[in-house]
Image (spheres, grey):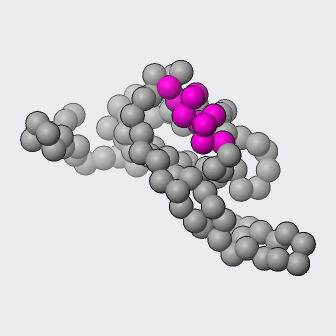
Amino acid sequence: MKMVWAILRPEKISDAIASLEKAGFYAFTRLDVMGRGRQKGIVTGSSRYEEIAKTSLMLVVEDHEADRAVETLKIAVRTGNPGDGKIFVSPLGAVYSIRTKSRES
């Protein structure tokens, strides 16, 4: 299994979730986060914002579904502007269900 972790523009999260659901990815965890990328914040007029509000979306998918989940997100959230976000994919060593006390494959 793989973890797909995306840091996205908050205004694009509804598009991301709708696209993931349409593609058959229903389970996710959403977090509101703050941070910055290579642009080191943003300057608006005379104000500089060192950290920008983003939304983090995490989902666990089967290995063979990871590329499709990533492509679904990339299409749904891209604006073409700096700050569109990042998507990270990591292998998972193990997944356990707390309710059933079982290890999932």
Q: Determine the main secondary structure of the stretch shown in magenta.
A: helix
Residue 38 in sight here: yes
Q: Is residue 4 left or right of residue 47?
A: left
Task: Indicate the quadrant containing the N terminus: top left, top right, bottom left or bottom right.
Answer: top left
User: Magenta residues, as a range?
Assistant: 12-21
Quarter in which the C terminus is drawn: top left
| Residue 68 on image: x %, y % | 51, 29
x 68%, y 46%: residue: 11
- In this view of the protein, can residue 74 be seen by the observer? no
In magenta segment, residue 19 = yes
Where is residue 76? Give x, y as percent.
65, 33
Q: Position of residue 27 (x, y in %)?
A: 39, 34
Residue pushed farthest left?
A: 101
The residue nearer to you, when weighing 74 against 34, is 34
Give coordinates of residue 98: x percent, y percent.
16, 44
Q: Nearer the viewer, residue 58 or 89?
A: 58
From the viewer's perspective, tell me whether residue 21 is left or right of residue 94: right
Q: Is residue 10 above or below residue 101?
A: below
Count of numbered labels shown in the rendering: 0
The quarter holding residue 47 reads bottom right
- Residue located at (14% from left, 39% from top): 99
Specify whether residue 7 is painted magenta. no
Decide which of 47, 70 is in the foreground and name it.
Answer: 47
